[in-house]
Each structure stands twice: as C-alpha cells, then as structure tokens.
Amino acid sequence: MGFRAQNHGGLHNGFVLPLYLARPLVAASRTPYPAKVIRPLLERYGFDGLSYIVARDDGVGTTGEIAWSTHPPPWSSLYLRAGYAAVDPRLTNTRHRVTPFLWDADASIGVAHAKRFVRDAARFGIRSGVVISLHDGANGHVALTFDSASSLQSSDRRESVLASLGDLTLIAMALHESVLSWRVAKSSVRKHKGPSLTQRECDCLKFAARGMTSADIGTKLSVTERTVNFHFGKLRRKLGALNRPEAIAKGVTLGFVTLD
C-alpha cells in the first residue's frame, strides 16, 4: 500500500501529491517505523509531533484513544486512562467539521472540563496545533493533530501555519489513507485475536521494550519494583512467554507494543 512517486508528483488510486510531499510519504508507507520519516516532515512545518486519534460517540458520551503518535507512549496511555477524548478541545471542536481547526491551550484554559487535559498535554510538549478532522466509516471520527510545544498567539507563527494549511491537509489525508489507518486496523485485529492485558501490564511491557528495568519502570509508574515484577509475571502467563524478552517479542507481534 502506498504512492508511486512520479515526476509530476505521487499518485495512489487517483490521489495526487506534489513531489516534495510524495517522496517522504512513500517512504513512510513502506517503513515499519514511519515516525522516523514523519518527524522530519513535521519539523519542516514547525511542528513537534503528530497524533492519530480515533473517537466514537456511543450515545452516552465520547470515548477514544490515541491510536498512533510520535509522542512518548506514556502520553497515549494517560490519554486513554483519563478519558481525555471526552474533553479534548481538538476533538470537541472538530466533531462535526472537516475544515482545519487551529487550537491553542491558552484559549482552552478557561474551559473548566478541559483544564486537566491542557495541563497534562503541556507536560508532553503539546500546547497548540492544527487539527485535520476526518470521518472514516470503519474508525468513526478520526483526528490527525499536528502538535506544537509553542503557542500560536504569535502573529508570525499564526501566519506561517495558515500558509501551510493546504499542505497539512494533504499530508493528513495521505497519512490516513496509506500509512496509518491500515496499521491501526491491523493492530486492532491482533489485539482482538490475542490475550487481554490490563493497562498497567501494557505500560510495563512498553517500557521494558524500551530497555527499562523493573526498578526504572517502578519509578516511572510510581509503584514498587516488586509490583512491576508481579505485573510481568501475570502478563508472561497471559502471553505464554518463558521470559521477559519473549514477552516483549510477543507483545510486538500482537500489537501491544510499537517500537517507533
């Protein structure tokens, strides 16, 4: 799946991109770790990260998760655990729109229910950005967020972002169609086929995959080393793994862990 880079641009199922966008997006669609290719593209437009958020309205409220992101995994875990999809201004302001949305934490801080989200997002360098909202038949409301650690209040920065909205929209659509949506779907299938892990077990597995010891993970999660080992014992049994490296390998295969 992906684009064919041609002299006039990139073409995929009739979807054409300028060559300067087609080249990195072709590379992103072919690599197992697209974040390595996507980050330089984000930097070109002055952004620090990107998230692919999938949200659904069940009639009672909004639920959702960060299905893929260039930000550290703890942010995705916190977002899910805290139920931030229900209050995230990037979602609440784009649920029924398709035009790009510019948001800034300073403009959201006065909204009572969004204060905790704004505070926690800032800890991960997310203070403003552009949201491209898509509506996918399989995934529901999908939002691709181009995130920045700085504010959009500066007139120069705002003008720069406004001038790049066309490119950002094309990038978001291309990433959704040829890079991210199928990866998320594939990961979802793997998770449903495999065993069920608790959020804390997933956190332990993700941090271990990044080389952290039980003591390091305990510090990160504010629990004891013994508690971390207890979680590992449970998840190893669920995954049918003899040891930690095998558990990590199976976690990657089943989609519980991503290495980008």
Image: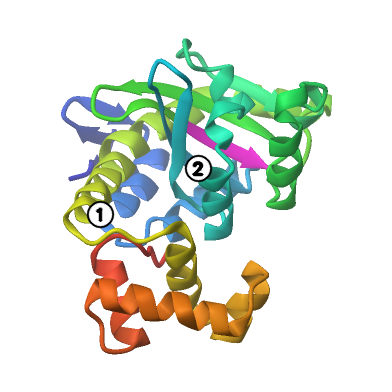
- For image coordinates 81% across by 28% down, the residue present is 106
* Mark in the foreground, 1 or 2: 1
**Residue 74 place in picture, x, y as percent:** 57, 58
User: Residue 52 versus residue 6: which sits nearer the camera?
Assistant: 52
Q: From what the image shows, is residue 119 above or below residue 255?
A: above
Above or below residue 40? Residue 20 is above
Q: Which residue is disc 2 drawn over? A: 51
The amino acid type, in three-letter code, at marker 1 is Lys
Residue 158 versus residue 124 in the image, above or below: above
Image location of residue 260, percent across then percent down: 43, 63
Residue at 67% from the left image edge and 76% from the top image edge? 219
For label 1, the SS is helix
Task: Point out the stretch of residues depicted in magenta.
Answer: 144-148
- Determine if residue 167 is in view: no
5 to the left or right of 215: left
Q: Which mark is residue 191?
A: 1
Please tell me in which quadrant of the rendered image residue 206 appears: bottom left
Judging depth in this view, the residue of 250 and 225 nearest the camera is: 225
Q: Is mark 2 on a helix, strand or loop?
A: strand
